[in-house]
Image (cartoon, rainbow, N blue to C red):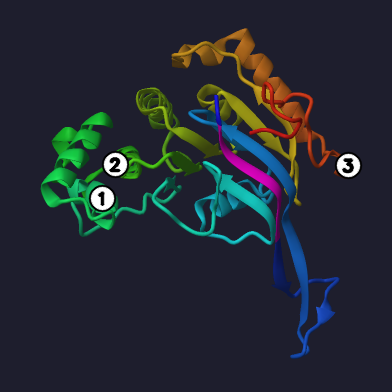
Amino acid sequence: MAIEIEARGLSLVYSIRGAKNGRNDKNGKVSGTLTALENVNLAVREGEFLSLVGPSGCGKSTFLYILAGLIKKTSGSILIGGKEVNGPALDRGIIMQAYALFPWRTVQKNVEFGLEVKKVPRAERAGIARGYIELVGLGEFSDRYPFELSGGMKQRIAIARALAYNPDVLLMDEPFAAVDEQTRGALHEELLRIWEETQKTIIFVTHSIDEAIFLSDRVAVMTPGPGTVRKIVDIKLARPRASEIRTSAEFAKYRREIWQLLQNRTDRTEAVVTETCILESEPQEAVI
């Protein structure tokens, strides 16, 4: 498969105030820097489902927001389809923990929003939106408002809205963290069904090892900040996947491997790991 996303030498350094080891600025306040990501070299294949896992503060969400164009990198480059990311664009859809639905809009009108931005004619966008509302299984709720929906239903509408304007890449930042375990399991299966139908490239940020294994083709395990990739685990579980696979010995093997990776801090010389994440016929580099 072709490479969809490439990050080369990607770094992000924040300026902060109140740093213990900082210096006094011209106003007499102590300032310093915080490195969130450092020299990240990554690649994502077209149509791949990849998850990022790691401890809080390791930079996994930061990487997602740089890719979304919501945060500017300090150095390096990040490309989608060979084009540099310089800001938000409709080739990317982002879904966050907060459902971010407009409370004054119906389900139908929420899903139409991105199509309005693209200036799709009213009748056409209404039909497209209805199709995606049906895709997430909420066709009978198209005239409801967000306050009339459960948390799981709201998240499905957020997915429908992101899909409706047909982005090349879906970026998902812990989208199911706020729902109960039973609902989360149902949403996992729903997301996989939609992904298999649409063949979108998905980058999924999570703290849950089980969630990452169940959903992904590969799982990128990140070290504590400054963010770097310690290892990428290739998940060779058969698809389509059902919840029963979580009790299998193979699933337990992946869980143990990722858990052990998260328990041991990577040496700083391992900023880029190559041995388990080399694309066929591509130069050696860290790949996610």
* Mark number displayed over residue 92: none
Task: Find out whether residue 92 is within the magenta segment.
Answer: no
Residue at image mark 3: 269
- Looking at the image, the residue that sits furthest to the bottom is 27
Q: In front here: 192 or 97?
A: 192
Q: Magenta span covers which residues?
A: 3-12
Residue highlighted by disc 2: 164
Instruction: Name the residue beneath numbered marker 1.
Output: 115
Rate crowding at label 1 as few (under 14), some (14 to 19) or many (20 or more) other CA atoms within 10 Å. many
Give the amino acid at mark 2.
Ala
- Quick check: is 7 in the magenta stretch? yes
Circles 3 and 2 in contact, beta carbons < 8 Å: no
> Could you say whether the residue bearing mark 2 is in a helix, strand or loop?
helix
Looking at the image, residue 10 sits to the left or right of residue 271; the answer is left
Decide whether the magenta segment is chiefly helix, strand or loop. strand
Q: Specify whether residue 105 is in view.
A: yes
